Structures are given as structure tokens and as C-alpha cells.
Amino acid sequence: MLISILLIRRSLIAKLLAFISSVILAEATSSAKSVDTASEPHDAAPDVNVIAKREGEDTHFFVQNKELCEVTMTFQMRLVNLISTTTLPYTATFPPGKTVEAFALEPTSPEAKWEYSYTNYYKLGSSCAVHDDSAVYQLPFAPGTRYKVTQGYNGSYSHKGSNLYAIDWQMPEGTPVYAARGGIVVKVRDDSDKGGGSVKFDKYNNYVLIRHEDGTLGHYCHLKKAGVVVRPGQVVRPGQLIAHSGNTGYSSGPHLHFSVFKTKDGKERVSIPVKFHTADDEVAVTLKEGRKYRASSAAPIVVTAQKAAAMPIQGTIGQ
């Protein structure tokens, strides 16, 4: 009888240990890394959070976008005994001021161990934006004044890749800068007084970032310390004073850098060529390096908050 009791106890202990082991194996392990790709010239790091929530055996991933414009993110994941509800790697554009579910992970075999690790890359802007090519931009300085384009499209010094279609105008520090196109101010910086001709100075760049009604972004860079006169959330019209030029960030001398872009994914953005009104040309023109251009006094087009935000802002792209 004693031997039987001992055998039963040993059997129960063995079953209990096996149950504990199965529970431990079924628990998830995870690791994550977020990367903002602010290493691109003149970029601004977005304010976003990735939130993972367990619901039963599933893990749901949400993106909290605290910015005033879209953010594009790319998720790269390593999965063990898990399947995603989206194709990986996954790229999506998330709307401003909202928390949106991106995707979920489900165990392929719930009884077995599962784990994941991921890296997500993120950039300000929308991959769904389609530039309105009928839009003509004003020169971003005072009517009647003339400034020289020191670096144009595909400029040899730094206008490649994400800045392929950027324009640089040589101008003294403190020159008034006007909006080339209307929209909503989504991000600004003007607390830096550092600049130099090395990429290591890029993190000291002062800027104004404006979202246009088609979802593209206009970037005004190298601004003077305390030189920005607009605030995030403000609607501006073409020809409205927004800042004063400077020599901050990655800059070889006092000038204004302007570009229009959208995002390709969470790692890259797409530079967009645009045309300008000038006082001396009858039609909109592509600016040429080495030439001086005089700003016209054309009446600005009023942009309302509703019009500036007219483009649908939620879109996703699986890759």
C-alpha cells in the first residue's frame, strides 16, 4: 500500500512538472527597437509610440502618432512560431493625433514556445500623398527682392537622394522668409545657433515644416535662432511671413534651403520637383542654379484649415 501511494505521488509530481514546463514554453519572449531616420539631411524626428497589447494568445500592435501630420512606419520582424495578419516587412502611413492598430501576431501552434523581435523605422510624412502638379509655388522671399540660386536640382554639393529637388538661395542672415505654398504648420525649431559645413552639424538645423493640402510637406531650413514666427497647428497662406533665414545646421554659409517631399517608407523620403512664379517670367519655371530670381507681388491664395487638411490621411501599404 505504501509503495502504491508513493508511486501515485511521484506520478502526480511528474504531471505537475510537465504542466509547469508547458506553460513556461508557451510564454512569449520579445524585443523591440525603434529607429527614427533623422540622419537624412534636414529631417525631423517624429513623436510616435508603438504599443503591443496581449489579447489571449494574440499580440496586437498599435501606433500612437502624436504629430500634426502623417507618419510613415516600416516594421521588420523576426518571428518564431508566429504569423502576422499583414505581409512582412510592413509599411503603413498613420494619421495624426490618433492611435491606430497596425497588425497582430498569432501563434501557429499555441502549445509551443513563441517569440518575436522587431525594428521599426519611422519618418514624418505620408507615403500615400500625390503631389498636385498644377500647384505653382511662390518664391519664399519678399516681393520685388532678388536672390541667387546657389544650388539647384541635383546639385553637386548636397542635393542628392532625398534632397534631389531642393533649392538653395544665398541670402544674408535675418532675411524674411515667406511661405511658398499654403498649408498647416506641423513642426518648427528655432533654438539652435550652431552651423557648419559638415554633416555633423545637421542636428542643429532650425526649420519650419508645412503640410500642403495634397499631403506633401514643404521644408524651410537653416533658419536663424529665434527666427520662426509661426507655431505648430497654425494655417498659413502663400506669401505669409513664417521665419527669418540663417546659417544653422549643415550649412556652408548663410542661405535658405527649401524642398517638397513625401515618404517612400519608414526609411526614405521622395523629393518632388516643383515650379515657381517669378516676377520676370510669364509662366511657371524650374529654377536654375547660378541665376537670380525676383519674387512677384501676386496676390496670395487664402488657405483654410479645412482645405489644408482636405486630403484623406489614412492609408496603408503592405510590402
Image: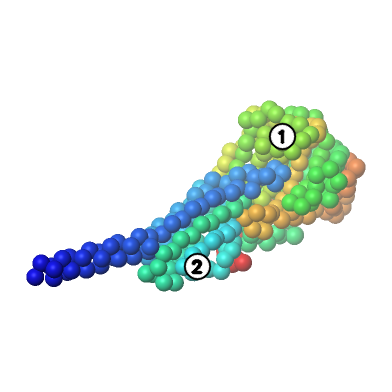
Compared across the picture, whether 211 is left or right of 164 comes to left
- Circle 2/circle 1 CB separation < 8 Å: no
Quarter occupied by the N terminus = bottom left
The one nearer the camera, 215 or 78, is 78
Q: Quadrant of residue 222?
A: top right
Mark carried by residue 201 = 1
Residue 129 place in picture, x, y as percent: 65, 60
The one nearer the camera, 16 or 177, is 16
Q: Residues within 10 Å of mark 2 (few under 14, many from 20)?
A: some
Compared across the picture, whether 299 is left or right of 307 comes to right
Against 317, residue 234 (above or below) is above
Q: Quadrant of residue 140?
A: top right
- Identity of the residue furthest to the left in this view: 1
Disc 2 versus disc 1: nearer the observer: 2
The one nearer the camera, 242 or 15, is 15
Compared across the picture, whether 33 is left or right of 51 comes to right
Specify the amino acid type for callout 2: Ser
Q: Residue at x 72, y 44 (%)?
A: 41
Residue 260 place in picture, x, y as percent: 72, 51
Q: Residue at x 53, y 68 (%)?
A: 86
Against 24, residue 171 (above or below) is above
Give the residue number, with chain letter if any, for mark 2: 84
The one nearer the camera, 260 or 281, is 260
Quarter occupied by the C terminus = bottom right
Q: Residues within 10 Å of mark 1 (few under 14, many from 20)?
A: some
Name the colouring of the figure: rainbow
Q: CA distance from mark 2 to mark 1?
A: 40 Å
Look at the image and tell me whether residue 64 can be seen.
yes
- Identity of the residue furthest to the right in this view: 290
Against 139, residue 275 (above or below) is below
Element under disc 1: helix
Residue 239 place in picture, x, y as percent: 71, 42
